Image: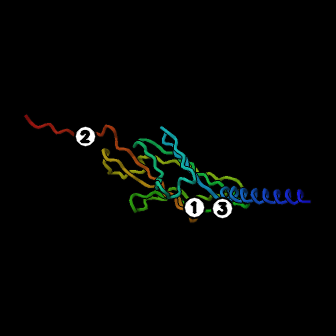
Amino acid sequence: MAAKKKYLYLALTLACFLGIILIFVFDGYIGVYDSIVMDNGLYEQRVEADQWQPGEYNYLASIDVDRDGRIDFTYTVENHRFTGYESPVEISLYHGQDKVAVLLTDEASAAAFGTAEITWSLEAASLLPADYPEDEPYNAVVVIIRGEVNRQINIGINSSPYPIKTIIVPPE
């Protein structure tokens, strides 16, 4: 009889231990996560859901592009819940504190344990003001608002490597 109780307590202990492990696994997995892939033609950069969070290193997602280049974005929303997910998404362009333009408004909807993708491209030349000097770099920020979630991506537009400069020759 004592051996049966001993195995019963061992089984209950193992079941509780397994239950605690399952709680931690589900707690870390269940939810809605977003990521973005940015491709400037030279390299592709992926920012995962946990990198968006401000923390010890205060990571700021950023990418550089040449003035004649283009950046392709793929924003992915992964739904790891038992119910569907739907939320409006607004993608805007800022320079400093000023909102320059709304680039895209869309709806992110994903079935249970599904994904939603939103893709768009930005031409670097279209982001620059008309009278902006070619020998100076330009910085802009793309802000992605999905429900109450706010994500920011810093875009650096490089100056022209060989700007046209007027050379004044003194008279002889």
* Quadrant in which residue 19 is drawn: bottom right
Which amino acid lies under the numbered mark 2 shown in the image of this protein?
A: Lys
Q: Secondary structure at mark 2?
A: loop
Q: Which residue is mark 3?
A: 86
Which residue lies most toward the left here? 172
Q: Residue at x 32, y 50 (%)?
A: 132
CB under 8 Å between discs 1 and 2: no
Mark 2 or 3 closer to N-term? 3
**Front residue (pair 133, 140):** 140
Numbered disc in front, either 1 or 2:
1
| Quadrant where the C terminus is found in the figure | top left
Q: Estimate how packed mark 3 is, as few (under 14), some (14 to 19) or many (20 or more) residues with alpha carbons within 10 Å.
A: some
Horizontally, residue 16 falls left or right of residue 28, namely right
Taking the image as shown, residue 34 lies to the left or right of residue 80, namely left
Q: Secondary structure at mark 3?
A: strand
Q: Which residue is mark 1?
A: 146
Quote the CA–CA distance across marks 2 and 3.
52 Å
Which residue in the rendered view is the most extreme toward the bottom? 148
- Of residues 75 and 104, the one nearer the viewer is 75
Q: Is residue 23 left or right of residue 71?
A: right
| Percent of width and height locating residue 128 | 38, 50
Q: Mark 2 highlights which residue? A: 165
